[in-house]
Image (cartoon, grey):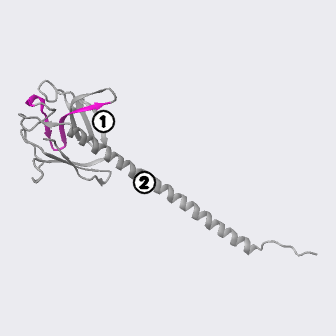
Amino acid sequence: MRPVTGFTLVEVVVALAILSLVMLTTITGLRTLANTQGALDRITGRVDQLRTVSSFLRDTLESSVIGSGSTGGLALGGGGRASAYFEITADSLTWKSTILIGESFGGTYLLRVAREDDLLVLRWQEPGPSGEPDQDWREAQERTLVEDVQEFEIAWREDAGDDWRQRWEKGDVAGWVRLQLRSSDRYWPDLVMQVPQ
């Protein structure tokens, strides 16, 4: 008679323990991979948002020029005071620029970037006859640039070697503008833009 062959109870228990450890390691690795992917998606989204907002602000400021004969306002190639507009307040930056909105709509607009509650909002409107805002900014068209804004500060200086200033008075000339932003408990790199002369 042949002896009965098979696994002993100890061998089965050891095999199940090893299989459980392999499965636990695999599941933990997959969970770590999913968490890493989620973190990478959040970081990539934040970098994309930063790049998009920074590029837009730089491009629209670069398309504005200081008008000759204006007293520190921005103009679009013109020289009259009515064609120039530039203003800084504690929580907003307003300037005149040429923009393209959509595929076939655009032109010369007054643009305003401001903190509104916990949002950084871009608003735009056509300039009035005097070249200044013709309607209340709360009624202007808008687009949210950044959500969950905790800090937003604007500073300016006339020349590269000057100290940054935050108080703006009509007639001041800004050669450089700096925006400081903190959102979602993270600071953005300072956005420093040169205003073309």
Whether residue 81 is visible here, answered yes or no, is yes
Image position of 10 with respect to 135: above or below: below
Residue 40 marker: 2
Q: Which residues are magenta?
A: 79-101
Residue closer to the observer: 40 or 74: 74
Q: In percent of the image, x 25 and y 32: which residue is there?
A: 99
Mark 1 to mark 2 CA distance (whole Å): 26 Å
- Residue 60, given in percent of the width and then of the height, sits at 23, 38
Q: Residues within 10 Å of mark 2 (few under 14, many from 20)?
A: few
Check residue 143 in the rendering and tell me which mark sits there, or answer none: 1
Mark 1 is surrounded, within 10 Å at the Cα level, by few (under 14), some (14 to 19) or many (20 or more) other residues, namely few
The answer to whether the residue labelled 1 contacts the one labelled 2, judged by CB atoms less than 8 Å apart, is no
Residue 164: within the magenta? no
User: Nearest the camera: 177 or 68?
Assistant: 68
* Snapshot quadrant of residue 10: bottom right
The answer to whether 28 is drawn above or below residue 138 in the figure is below
157 lies left or right of 152: left
What is the three-letter code of the residue carrying label 1?
Arg
Q: Amino acid at mark 2?
A: Leu
Of residues 45 and 19, the one nearer the viewer is: 45
Give the mark nearest the N terminus, 1 or 2: 2
Q: Is residue 36 above or below residue 84?
A: below
Picture coordinates of residue 196 (x, y %)? 16, 41
- Residue 112 percent across, percent down from the top left: 21, 36
Q: Residue at x 15, y 25 (%)?
A: 128
Secondary structure of the residue carrying numbered label 2: helix
